[in-house]
Image: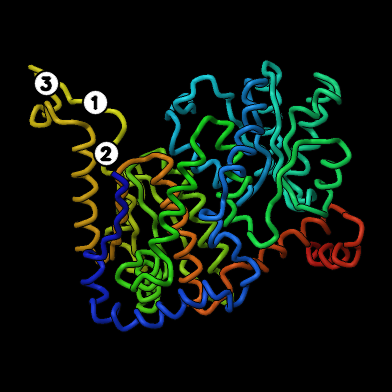
Amino acid sequence: MNRFSLSLEHVEPFVPHREIDALAEETRQVVARVHQKSGPGSDFLGWLDLASSTTAADLQAMNEAAQALHDHTDAVVVIGIGGSYLGARAVMSALSHNFTGKGPDAGAPDIYFAGNNLSEEYLAELLDILQEKEFGLVVISKSGTTTEPAIAFRILKKMLEERIGREAARQRIIAITDARRGALRTLADQEGYRSFVIPDDIGGRYSVLTPVGLIPIAIAGHDIAALVHGAAEMEDLTCPARTFWENPAAQYAAVRNLLYRKGKKVEILVNYQPKLHYFAEWWKQLYGESEGKDGKGIFPAAVDFTTDLHSMGQYIQEGERILFETVLSVEEPTRQVVIPDDPADLDKLNYLAGKRVDEVNKMAELGTLLAHVDGGVPNMLISLARLDEHHLGQLIYFFEKACAISGYLLGVNPFDQPGVEAYKRNMFALLGKPGFEEETKKLRKKIKK
């Protein structure tokens, strides 16, 4: 069963069907515009038909590279930031044991992440862990000069080379970078690292189905062919030949824009499975970086229920009515735990005896959805049959396609991110990077004031 569904039932009290229908034709035109590559940022639409154009040979090459690290290490550090690591981490977390971090392949190396922050303690503690490990590196960067991953790679490469020698270290490093230019491409060519290309026409936050995401996911022992196949299936379900009411990505994009126009400025992605926490982190980057510009955009937030019902639940239920929720519901968990009977029944839970914990979770999900809708919070519901590679592939492509459509409906370029450069210029100036002397002077005067 490969079921994926989007329900708008709990949006209609806030956005009547006739209003959605009225936006259907404009949305259909936007879908056509995306596929015609005629809108702003169209140079970055390489992800659009990536899943259906990925060949068996492509997958084999990635699996072979992954297997080489898998077989000769007991730990692999994935070095990257933003879209260069969040997609892989999202998929791995969703498919792995909550506590061991392992998937079905118990012999897969431990996967660690670096280059996604500038915490000295984080790096020092990673180095502590690696002292006891035979480790390898996957470094992901188009330029090779992005500060966070570049620092982490410099430190970890030095450690690896000192441990096993420069020649042996070359066999344990995979570089995923630009095809022709950049510092990491130069280094990979000089050192002879096994390398893969980040396509020029795919931005980082849309790159999970390229080697950026697929190689780390394969190293962890997951089925990247099934992931790509699921994405290809959703590619077909959201193509221009589909009508608006056959296309879930078009419906989702249209409804969230209609809600935004009614003052719903914050979208909360809700999950009831802890394994989806990092999927929400990937989603937050995808939508925040794509839509938050030109003074516009829905703010993407996320909660892990039922945990966060005990912290954020009060605000969502009765706070300012600027929110709507998109709920990710997994129909069937992979494991079963039944609540036992207790003769003393001091906790008054015997009415649940014999029920699966997931049944309680599902009733919490439904009860919360109904309460929030009654409290003035529209809810969209996305249902997946189960958490596996195929369904995650569907979900990834669904959100990517919907993001492109939604950005164009909003009137922004969903493929650039000009605002992320502002903090970098200040950081470089404060650190005294060559070429930033004038900015350094200006900032020092500002700080003194």
Which residue type does callout 2 highlight? Glu
Which picture quadrant has residue 334? top left
Q: Is residue 365 left or right of residue 234?
A: left
Which residue is painted at 81% across and 19% down in the image? 164
Which residue is painted at 65% across and 44% down in the image? 116
Which residue is painted at 48% across and 26% down in the image? 102
Name the secondary structure under disc 2.
loop
Name the secondary structure under disc 1.
loop
Q: Nearer the viewer, mark 2 or mark 3?
A: 2
- Location of the C terminus by quadrant is bottom right
Residue nearest the observer in this picture, 391 or 344: 391
Classed neighbour count for the residue bearing mark 1: other residues with Cα under 10 Å, few (<14), some (14–19), many (≥20) = few
| Disc assigned to residue 332 | 2
Which residue type does callout 3 highlight? Asp
Which picture quadrant has residue 255? bottom left
Classed neighbour count for the residue bearing mark 2: other residues with Cα under 10 Å, few (<14), some (14–19), many (≥20) = few
Q: Position of residue 299 (x, y in %)?
A: 47, 64
Determine whether 195 is above or below 109 in the image: below
Determine whether 22 is above or below 170 in the image: below
Q: Which residue is mark 1?
A: 337
Name the secondary structure under disc 3.
loop
| Disc assigned to residue 341 | 3
Q: Is residue 441 left or right of residue 289?
A: right
- Location of the N terminus by quadrant is top left
Which residue type does callout 1 highlight? Val
Q: Find the distance from the CA under tag 3 to the CA under tag 1.
A: 13 Å
Q: Earlier in the sequence, mark 2 or mark 3?
A: 2
Q: Is residue 119 left or right of residue 321?
A: right
Q: Find the distance from the CA under tag 1 to the CA under tag 2.
A: 13 Å
Q: Is residue 310 visible?
A: no
Q: Find the distance from the CA under tag 2 to the CA under tag 3.
A: 23 Å
